[in-house]
Image: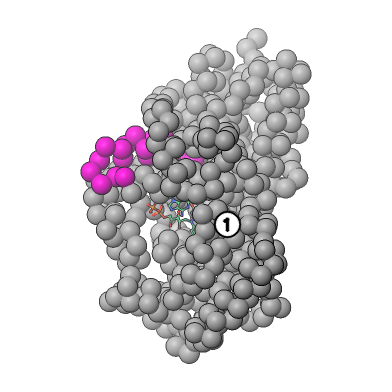
Amino acid sequence: MSSPSIVWFRDDLRLADNPALRAALDLGEPIIALFVLDEESDGIRALGGASLWWLHHSLASLAERLRERGAELILRRGAAGRIVRDLVADSGAGAVFWNRRYGGPERDVDAGVKSALREEGVTVASFAASLLHEPWTVTTGSGTHYSVFTPFWRACLALPAPRAPLPEPREIPGATPVPASDALDDWELLPTAPDWAAGLRETWEPGEPAARRRLKEFLDTDLPGYDSARDEPSAGATSLLSPRLRWGELSPFTVWHEAVGVDGAGRFLSELGWREFAWHTLYHAPDLATKNLRRDFDAFPWPPLDPSRLDAWQHGETGIPLVDAGMRELWHTGYMHNRVRMVTASFLIKNLLIDWRLGEEWFWDTLVDADDASNPFNWQWVAGSGADAAPYFRVFNPELQAKKFDPQGVYISQWASDAPTEPIVDLGETRKAALAAYDEVKRGS
Ligand code: FAD
């Protein structure tokens, strides 16, 4: 009797360049492809609404692609450690393969499963698939993690080049009997009452084939102009690959190898470097979403929350056109241009004096690319409390930013033509108040 191999899919919803899947196929046993929706394990962050929407469609696409090649995608919901072990016991699986995760709670779950299964004599192997460089391989001369991006990225570039991506398997022989699976629709990941996802449906096509098409389109048409136009929110000059990388529909190895060597790719590749930097930072600071990296910021005197201001920010009703345009783009599409993310985040923290964690939570719930590293990392970067962060006293002026990056007002009229025109705060005065609050942090440190 054969003993199947389990491939445990997580943030790697793809068939191409999937080393866990490759290893399972190489073993020659039939495959059980598994995805677990884990809302129970300690510390795992519950996914936001936009993420659940993406996940639903990406799983549907993965299931279809697996089926075409011979295997079913088995869906289970619950504490992943228990579910994987139960499935091994029930199916008689002899091996379990997965691609690594780098968040603290996820690593704890994986380490627990690995040691429990190995004790039972099951083969377990994990692989590097979602970062170009493993976090423990990029260290300073004294063996610590880099806290500044430029030397970090220089060190990455000095390492052996990222490995070549693996080809997509043509056949994936599935195990029989097929283990029981939940029905995707029963998970109710899509919003129904109300159905707020129309804008997401208009904007995105989740799944590996669409991700590959977008990569090709970006490389063919947008990459040459990327460096000069990437900061203009109406230019459509960036790759829009962030949700595809977040869900692993594309591997960074694939993106790297297809872009490297193309004229003008250096700037784009260094943005992948920021993604790496955020993940390496999370690896070393697992509570990045809740704790200031710079602990002197714990003394920041956040005033009591005025919920009406938070609400105005969330719904694009601040009366500051670029901020309102960004927040409305986010609400409609599950995405916001990077320049505008910086401006809206700076406005929340430094003009409304609202704790960055509340902004981070809103982005977590509404972004299709929200991830455990990039979202808190960038919020802390804007706040000034993070790694290689913008200094706190750098307060983006949303009006000047609009003049510079949206000079014709194209982006603002696309998203905020009917937004209020009376600002809820005075930009100059609130800036002064923010700087005074920051002085307290400085005095305390
Ligand atoms: P491109 O400009 O085409 O960049 C290519 C890829 O590089 C992106 O897809 C992304 O994977 C990576 N990248 C680019 N900039 C960054 C960055 N600053 N940090 C980390 N990776 C980067 N990005 C996320 O992927 N998830 C998030 O949850 C997220 N939250 C953010 C919150 C704030 C407050 C800010 C200021 C930025 C945030 N970013 C986040 C980073 C950045 O805004 C997005 O990655 C980018 O806008 C995605 O668009 P793109 O794919 O067209 O980017």
- Residue 394 visible, this angle: yes
Name the outermost residue toward the top: 1
Q: At x 76% / y 18%, what residue is drawn?
A: 120
Give the image quarter of residue 356.
Answer: bottom right
Give the image quarter of residue 313.
Answer: bottom right
| Tag 1 residue | 386
Q: At x 25% / y 40%, what residue is drawn?
A: 262
Question: In screen coordinates, is 311 left or right of 408?
Answer: right
Q: Position of residue 240 (x, y in %)?
A: 39, 53
Q: At x 57% / y 22%, what residue is drawn?
A: 31
The residue stretch that appears in magenta: 246-266
Q: At x 56% / y 18%, what residue is drawn?
A: 30
Q: Position of residue 89 (x, y in %)?
A: 74, 23
Say what amino acid the circle numbered 1 marks: Gly
Q: How many marks?
A: 1
- Residue 176 visible, this angle: no
Question: In screen coordinates, is 286 left or right of 40?
Answer: left
**Which quadrant of the figure contains the N terminus?**
top right
Question: Regarding ligand 1, which quadrant of the image does it lie in?
Answer: bottom left
Question: In screen coordinates, is 218 left or right of 317?
Answer: left
* Between 96 and 2, the one nearer to me in the picture: 96
Query: Does 34 appear in magenta?
Result: no
Establish whether ligand 1 lies closer than 8 Å to the Cβ of label 1. Answer: no
Above or below residue 204? Residue 315 is: below
Query: Does 256 appear in magenta?
Result: yes
Name the outermost residue toward the bottom: 422
Label 1 packing within 10 angstroms: few (<14), some (14-19), many (20+): many
Q: Position of residue 421 (x, y in %)?
A: 44, 88
Above or below residue 190? Residue 339 is: below
**Helix, strand or loop under label 1:** loop
**Which quadrant of the figure contains the C terminus?**
bottom right
